[in-house]
Image: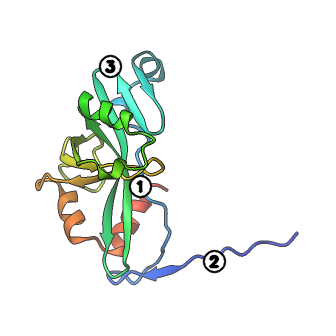
Amino acid sequence: MAKESMSQELIKCPCCEKMVPANDVELTYRLPDDIACMDEEERASTCKYTNDYVVCDDEYFYLRCILPLPVHDTGREYCLGVWVQISPNSFNKVWELWDDEEQANELPMRGLLANNVHLSTGAESAEVMIQLTGPTSRPVAIVKDEACSLYKEQQSGITIHRASEYSDLCR
């Protein structure tokens, strides 16, 4: 049986000169932190959820989003997979537009990060705006809270080395 060769583009980190896979794994949170800390029985009795949203006690509403961080000198983005808590009205609007091809034309909605993103400071409950992007793609989270270190990373970008540090958390 022949072994398939999988070639992967490598990029040299200017900080440490480490060769980093260009399509490395991106850090993703499976659930909002408050939901992840529940045991399975409690989660099953209080939450309705899919890979895209969580509704807890018909009171707390979460939406899975991507938080893009531009990577210096690559023309690429490193995307963190995060959860954002949104208001019931915003959730209803998202639900209404779920399959709408024109949803990206909606105004951004306010929310709060629902994950304490590793390697960052001030992330948990940081204010964000979410922008719907389309029925087959996750909404984008834009950090508005300047006290959150992700704000600066999103505005100024990150090094390849930093992207690799985030990816190392997945391993």
Q: Is residue 134 above or below residue 83?
A: below
Of the numbered discs 1 and 3, the one sitting upstream in the chain is 1
The mark closer to the camera, 3 or 2, is 3
As helix, strand or loop, the secondary structure at mark 1 comes to loop
Residue 133 badge: none
Residue 31's spot in the image, x, y percent? Answer: 40, 37
Q: Residue at x 39, y 31 (%)?
A: 54
The amino acid marked with disc number 1 is Leu
Residue 117's spot in the image, x, y percent? Answer: 30, 50
Could you say which quadrant of the image residue 69 lies in? bottom left
The amino acid marked with disc number 3 is Asp
Q: Is residue 126 left or right of residue 53?
A: left
Residue 2's spot in the image, x, y percent? Answer: 84, 72
Q: Which residue is mark 2?
A: 7
Q: Which residue is mark 1?
A: 27
Of the numbered discs 3 and 2, the one sitting upstream in the chain is 2
Q: Which residue is mark 3?
A: 58
Q: Residue at x 22, y 58 (%)?
A: 150
Of the numbered discs 1 and 2, the one sitting upstream in the chain is 2
